[in-house]
């Protein structure tokens, strides 16, 4: 169960049945299946793009909240920050599937910035901080 259902893959057996015997019927069924699969591909790209729109802000909020909580509770702060980084990686994957270059650029930029910020905040020595 998910809160945002992906599009359904077209059923191959729906287009090609055991009664498809002539080459004309096979060609007609093949063309219908190809059209249905192209529609599915377009819907899948839109779905992945929308998932990226949802995941990117969540990754930023999780990372920033983790960095804020890092001073109070290291385990909770690091967990949230690393979870935000993992969400950024997932956003890169979904934006790549959606074939959206601008979203992929934003996701990679956010991943790089959050990784550098987390490393700086977590591993900076006291002398380097002052």
Image (spheres, rainbow, N blue to C red):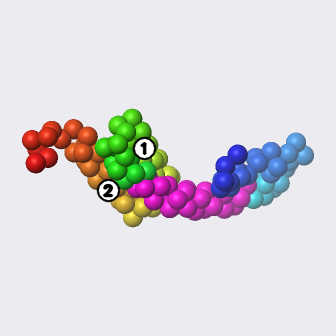
Where is residue 125? Give x, y as percent: 15, 38
Element at label 2 = helix
Are dots 1 and 2 in contact, CB under 8 Å?
no
Residue 96 at least partly seen: no
Q: Nearer the viewer, mark 1 or mark 2?
A: 1
Vertical position of residue 17 compared to residue 110: above or below: above
Residue 53: mark: none
Magenta stretch encompasses residue 43: yes
Label 2 neighbourhood size at 10 Å, few (<14), some (14-19), many (20+)? some
Predominant SS of the magenta segment = helix
Residue 56 percent coordinates (x, y): 45, 57
Q: Residue at x 43, y 55 (%)?
A: 61
Image position, residue 82 (x, y; %): 39, 41
* Magenta segment: 33-61
- Residue sticking out furthest to the top: 75
- Left/right placement of residue 51 relative to residue 117 reads right
| Residue 84 picture location, percent across and down | 42, 47
Q: Does the magenta portion include 85?
A: no
Foreground pick, 67 / 94: 67
Residue for point 14% across, 46% down: 129
- Circle 2 residue: 109
Spatial separation of the CA atoms under disc 1 and disc 2? 19 Å
| Residue holding disc 1 | 80
């Amino acid at each position: 169960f998910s809160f945002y259902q992906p599009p359904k893959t077209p059923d191959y057996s729906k287009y090609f049945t055991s009664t498809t015997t002539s080459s004309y019927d096979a060609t007609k069924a093949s063309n219908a299946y190809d059209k249905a699969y192209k529609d599915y591909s377009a819907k899948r790209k839109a779905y992945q793009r929308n998932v990226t729109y949802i995941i990117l802000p969540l990754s930023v909020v999780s990372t920033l909240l983790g960095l804020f909580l890092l001073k109070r509770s290291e385990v909770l702060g690091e967990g949230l920050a690393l979870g935000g980084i993992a969400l950024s990686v997932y956003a890169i994957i979904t934006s790549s599937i959606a074939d959206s270059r601008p979203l992929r650029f934003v996701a990679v930029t956010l991943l790089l910035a959050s990784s550098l910020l987390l490393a700086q905040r977590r591993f900076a020595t006291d002398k380097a901080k002052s």
